[in-house]
Amino acid sequence: MENAISNLITTYHELNASVIDQLDEEPSPLTFFRYVAKNRPFVVRQAATEWKAYNEWNAGYLRKKMEGESVKVAVTPLGNADAVVKQQDGSLVFVEPYETTEDFSSFLDYVQSSSTKGAGDTKNVKYAQTQNDNLHDEYANFLPDIPKDIPWARIALESHADAVNLWLGNDRSITSLHKDNYENIYVQIRGQKHFTLLPPCEMPCVNETFLPRGRYAPTAHPGRNEEEEGRLQVALENEASEKVPVAIWDPDVADQNTTRYSYLANPLRVTLEEGDMLYLPAMWYHKVSQTAGEEGFVCALNYWYDMDFSGHFWSGNNFVRDVVGEEGGQGSMGSSVGMSGKGAGEAREEK
Amino acid sequence: MENAISNLITTYHELNASVIDQLDEEPSPLTFFRYVAKNRPFVVRQAATEWKAYNEWNAGYLRKKMEGESVKVAVTPLGNADAVVKQQDGSLVFVEPYETTEDFSSFLDYVQSSSTKGAGDTKNVKYAQTQNDNLHDEYANFLPDIPKDIPWARIALESHADAVNLWLGNDRSITSLHKDNYENIYVQIRGQKHFTLLPPCEMPCVNETFLPRGRYAPTAHPGRNEEEEGRLQVALENEASEKVPVAIWDPDVADQNTTRYSYLANPLRVTLEEGDMLYLPAMWYHKVSQTAGEEGFVCALNYWYDMDFSGHFWSGNNFVRDVVGEEGGQGSMGSSVGMSGKGAGEAREEK
């Protein structure tokens, strides 16, 4: 099947641009839908410059709006939430962050003061990255500052946003390569985000491997405050828990954890500046790093819309997975099997 | 790969309706584009009842408009233009019709008088089925009677129709299962058309087999008029000519020429009545039979729009072909290989 898989990726590249389309202005619903249909990303530069969020949000304003409020914070030693961690025995684990609840203002202080750490700094990295429609929950105070929907997306997709999320952190956090089963409109407010994007057909390149789950947890030190202690270690879930498929190839470390197809990948890269908007199509792999704005933090919003599982797109992507899985042993880990038989019902769980 | 291929087809069916959508009225460009994006057909009943063609076209009107004009006619013994014919030695050939040029009025006489032949009737079948934008060529006299474009298709697809064709024949002609690399809007004017439709992912079911080409030709009888003679026989192209991939499974004779996947096919069936419109999406397999209208002929129009080869649709369908081809030997003919490596450049030739 090696030829078929290679042909899939090279034919896709022959027929599609190797850069991201840049639109001069927000698209009409029909123009937007053309991108959805093709499952191709685009950027609209300076699309959000009239938003109150863009015009008002600075550290002082955010603190004032959130006075007395607590928020959930992801804490990691290296800015690596939801990421692959190599254990001392060489095995890989998919590790989720330690989660705390903190006073917003203290959290923002921490983010601002810990931006761009130097070598040897062991201070943990904090990132507000709850992806549970947090703007209708813990950040509801900010709702008046943003559109409740992206009009052209709502009209084209015939639905309201399923979730609107705020992301707040600094340049020490990196979101590792993954995909979501959602149409995603991403809006940069403060700082920059650097996206590396791979289309769904490059699934054979990313070395999806079933890994055990773990979670960062503070090392126990009776009598000491966890926060002061700060040393986080990976706690594995029990062995009976289901393993999760994780892309272990990193396009920025392209010679490690490769499959025989990784060299065919053609990652698209784009940096969002303050006020820019990105359409990140459903099921595109994306890795995201960031650069802090002038006040030492990065803030972005995203609107998730349900993707359409009908038509040929979902079943076609499943087919690629199945073929790669049945081909077997593609990955350097030797455990990279496809998610055969994963039906539509399960599809919505992955986010 | 058998599981992967079976999963592709069954997952598609799980996620898509088993009947054709029926719209109450012509869609907006955005609604139409939703169907294009999903690559799903729909019917709009009575969409063309205001067209002059629908209201005026009867045998007398057609004759008058075409007075003195000649047209190209496909002649076959059994109504089987562009179809698979079994030779005496059991081998299959893809046979194109004998082509003549006839006075339009005489042709229409023949069509009307030969409708619904009885057993034992050996009279040839004639069908005006040139698919070369014939309404801007030999049938240009009818152009004022039809819209030059389908507005919602033109707006959604951002292009004018690449070809507008008239089809004129009777119930003795059958168009065998095939696909076109075009978005197709089909409009019934007189009589009925009975469509059997299969989505592109059912490619593994249809047993695409490379067959030699042939063409019907009159048996030579010096001194006799070909037309009087009428006996057509298959003339093979020379052996060096390229074989063509042909779907040899017929959903109406489902137990013959099967592949191991044919039983998974779920053909959609729809009959177009006079005034009805069908969106037949690009790359859907379709077989078409017809029933004559009250004057003994069938007349339809179709608008072909260029399909979009970018995005994931074309490359994804190619991938299915390649996997089926690499799996090999799926067909009862043992020669059913995929069209591996068929690039975008070649794609447009198939119509």
Image: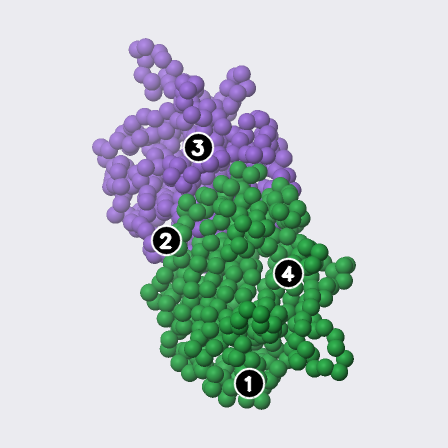
Chain colours: A purple, B green
Q: Chain of mark 4?
A: B
Query: With A134 as the anchor, is B237 left or right in this view?
Result: right
Residue under circle 2? Answer: A157
Distance between mark 3 and mark 1 Cα atoms: 78 Å
What amino acid type is highlighted by mark number 1? Ser
Comparing marks 2 and 3, which lies closer to the viewer?
2
Residue under circle 1? Answer: B105
Badge 2 and badge 1 in a common chain: no
What amino acid type is highlighted by mark number 4? Val
Residue under circle 3? Answer: A173
Distance between mark 2 and mark 3 Cα atoms: 31 Å
Residue B150 location (% of width, % of height): 44, 71
Q: Chain of mark 3?
A: A
Label 3 CA crowd tier, 10 Å (few <14, some 14–19, many 20+): many
| Residue B149 seen anywhere in this rendered image of the structure | no
Q: Are marks 2 and 3 in contact (CB under 8 Å)?
A: no
Label 4 CA crowd tier, 10 Å (few <14, some 14–19, many 20+): some
- Secondary element under disc 1, as helix, strand or loop, is helix
At horizontal 51% and vertical 56% (from top left) the residue drawn is B252
Above-or-below relation of B233 to A298: below
Above-or-below relation of B69 to B219: below
Q: Chain of mark 1?
A: B
Query: With A76 as the anchor, is B134 left or right in this view?
Result: right
Comparing marks 1 and 4, which lies closer to the viewer?
4
Badge 4 and badge 2 in a common chain: no
Q: Quadrant of the rendered structure where residue B37 is? A: bottom left
Label annotation for residue B161: none
Residue B179 location (% of width, % of height): 55, 59
Residue A66 location (% of width, % of height): 25, 37
Residue under circle 4? Answer: B85
